[in-house]
Image (cartoon, rainbow, N blue to C red):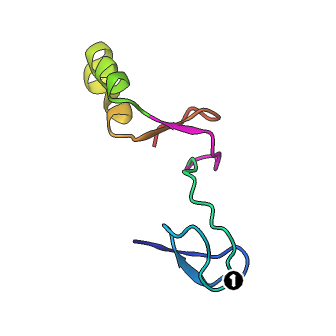
Amino acid sequence: MALIKCPECESEVSEKAKSCPKCGCPIDTATKCIKCGSKNVVPISGTSKGASVFLWGPFAAGKILSKYHCKECKHNF
């Protein structure tokens, strides 16, 4: 479990907390793209991964090892 800083009071808060225990500020826990920072991400389905393996074989390793796909920058992470 990682600790993040509260955007309001900057105290350390669990990344899984819904709000800061010190000041009550809501904590944004949405998944963000690691490349562009967008919240417009979707999980990559097992069916999509299977189809990629069937079509591309070892060249689909980047998609197979990833959990999310960013709709903004098209990055898999």
Quadrant of the rendered image containing residue 21: bottom right
Q: Nearer the viewer, residue 14 or 55?
A: 14
What is the magenta range? 34-43
Q: Nearer the viewer, residue 34 or 27?
A: 27
- Please say if 22 is above or below 65: below
Residue found at x 42% / y 33%: 44
- Please say if 50 is above or below 29: above
Q: Nearer the viewer, residue 72 or 40?
A: 40
Where's residue 76, x and y in %? 47, 37
- Label 1: state its secondary structure: loop
Where's residue 6, x and y in %? 64, 76
Badge 1 density bin: few <14, some 14–19, many ≥20, Cα 10 Å: few
Residue receiving disc 1: 23
Quarter of the C terminus within the rendering:
top left
Q: How many marks?
A: 1
Quarter of the N terminus within the rendering:
bottom left
Relative to 61, 10 lies left or right: right
| Amino acid type assigned to the residue bearing label 1 in the image | Cys
Where's residue 28, x and y in %? 63, 61
Quick check: is 41 in the magenta stretch? yes
- Please say if 40 is above or below 54: below
Q: Secondary structure of the magenta portion, mostly?
A: loop
Residue found at x 61% / y 72%: 19
Residue found at x 38% / y 32%: 63
Relative to 26, 15 lies left or right: left
Residue found at x 26% / y 20%: 57
Where's residue 68, x and y in %? 46, 40
